[in-house]
Image (cartoon, rainbow, N blue to C red):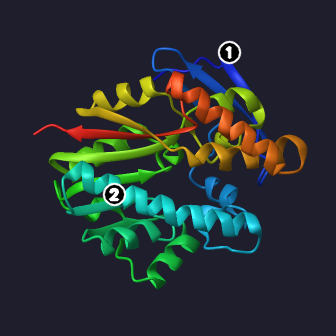
């Protein structure tokens, strides 16, 4: 994919850590945005060094964090039901970017054989303390060894998309399923909040996807889109953070209204705040 440095879609600030500003460059062919500049591998970890980066903690310090953990539990239950239905039963699942391991624990309770990969040391320690089986690198895993691979809000953090997708293809069994969840910059809440939209989350989010971009980049490596599902809770969570970035306060009533409007709008446009993409490796 080529990006013209002059084709700037938006300029966005890192509101949670560095307060640096980044450009979002647009590629029309793929309908995708790229964060510019993208931090190198050495610098990137410092942008995750925040107690507010909630997906790397089991934090319950505030009402917001307590609510997040409750919703996470419900979401994990729904995710397990989805992968079980997609696979027509339990099998072997790899969760890349497994965070603190709670999805894998829920999957194990439903009969799945679980493996996780998590690069963040803090989250990795929490997962290991819960006896979740983790690998240090996916390269150590055997070819065609998983029925399902999941990446819940992880693909947008990956620097080399082509290499990652090739690795996913290698690890999936023939007919295996890939489940990818990412934010959608074409949603109502993204358009409403613009540069304050929390799901841009620069520079931790290196890429910003649409339905077209997901279909196209995976199809090029023989992984084919079979279905798209909404993540309806995401619009409310993202709206809360977006309100905070825009006004300095989460404004829960306003955020709930915008989240509701986003989901209501998506009933017609099919452009939800986040989507789950189901893809399949051919037999």
Q: Looking at the image, is 251 positioned above or below residue 224?
A: below
Mark 2: secondary structure: helix
User: Can residue 136 be seen in this snapshot?
Assistant: no
Image-based side of 165 in relation to 280, left or right: right
Mark 1: secondary structure: loop
Residue found at x 76% / y 44%: 255
Structural crowding at the residue carrying mark 2, measured as other residues with C-alpha within 10 Å and reported as few (<14), some (14–19) or many (≥20)? some
- Spot occupied by residue 29 in the image (x, y as percentages of width and height): 46, 15
User: Can residue 53 be seen in this snapshot?
Assistant: yes
Q: Looking at the image, is 45 positioned above or below residue 127?
A: above
Answer with mark 1 or mark 2, whichever residue precedes in sequence: 1
The residue where tag 1 is placed is: 6
Image-based side of 82 in relation to 174, left or right: right
Q: Quadrant of the C terminus?
A: top left
Q: Which mark is residue 111?
A: none
Q: Nearer the viewer, mark 1 or mark 2?
A: 2
Structural crowding at the residue carrying mark 1, measured as other residues with C-alpha within 10 Å and reported as few (<14), some (14–19) or many (≥20)? few
- Spot occupied by residue 75 in the image (x, y as percentages of width and height): 49, 58
Residue found at x 74% / y 28%: 192
- Spot occupied by residue 135 in the image (x, y as percentages of width and height): 35, 70
Query: Which image quadrant for residue 165?
Result: top left
The residue where tag 2 is placed is: 81
Structural distance between the alpha carbons of marks 1 and 2: 44 Å
- Spot occupied by residue 205 in the image (x, y as percentages of width and height): 60, 43
Q: Looking at the image, is 56 positioned above or below residue 204?
A: below
Residue found at x 59% / y 35%: 263
Query: Residue 117 versus residue 261: which sits nearer the camera?
Result: 261
Query: Residue 239 versus residue 26: which sits nearer the camera?
Result: 239
Query: Residue 51 versus residue 255: which sits nearer the camera?
Result: 255
Query: Which image quadrant for residue 162?
Result: top left
Image-based side of 172 in relation to 180, left or right: left
Residue found at x 67% / y 21%: 9
């Amino acid at each position: 994919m080529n990006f013209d440095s002059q084709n700037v879609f938006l300029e966005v600030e890192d509101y949670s850590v560095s307060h640096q500003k980044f450009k979002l460059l647009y590629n029309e062919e793929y309908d995708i945005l790229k964060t510019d500049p993208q931090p190198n591998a050495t610098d990137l970890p410092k942008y995750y060094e925040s107690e507010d980066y909630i997906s790397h903690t089991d934090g319950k310090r505030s009402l917001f964090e307590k609510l997040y953990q409750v919703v996470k539990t419900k979401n994990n239950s729904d995710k397990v039901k989805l992968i079980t239905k997609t696979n027509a039963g339990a099998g072997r699942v790899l969760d890349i970017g497994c965070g603190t391991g709670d999805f894998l624990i829920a999957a194990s309770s439903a009969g799945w054989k679980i493996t996780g990969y998590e690069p963040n040391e803090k989250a990795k320690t929490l997962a290991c303390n819960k006896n979740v089986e983790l690998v240090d690198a996916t390269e150590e895993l055997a070819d065609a060894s998983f029925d399902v691979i999941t990446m819940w809000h992880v693909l947008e953090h990956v620097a080399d998309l082509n290499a990652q997708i090739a690795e996913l293809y290698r690890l999936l069994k023939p007919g295996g399923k890939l489940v990818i969840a990412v934010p959608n910059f074409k949603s109502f809440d993204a358009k409403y909040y613009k540069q304050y939209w929390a799901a841009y989350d620069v520079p931790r989010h290196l890429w910003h996807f649409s339905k077209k971009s997901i279909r196209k980049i995976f199809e090029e490596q023989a992984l084919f889109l079979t279905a798209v599902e909404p993540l309806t809770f995401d619009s409310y969570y993202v709206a809360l953070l977006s309100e905070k970035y825009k006004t300095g306060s989460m404004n829960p009533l306003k955020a709930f209204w915008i989240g509701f409007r986003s989901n209501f709008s998506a009933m017609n446009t099919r452009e939800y705040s986040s989507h789950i993409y189901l893809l399949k490796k051919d037999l």
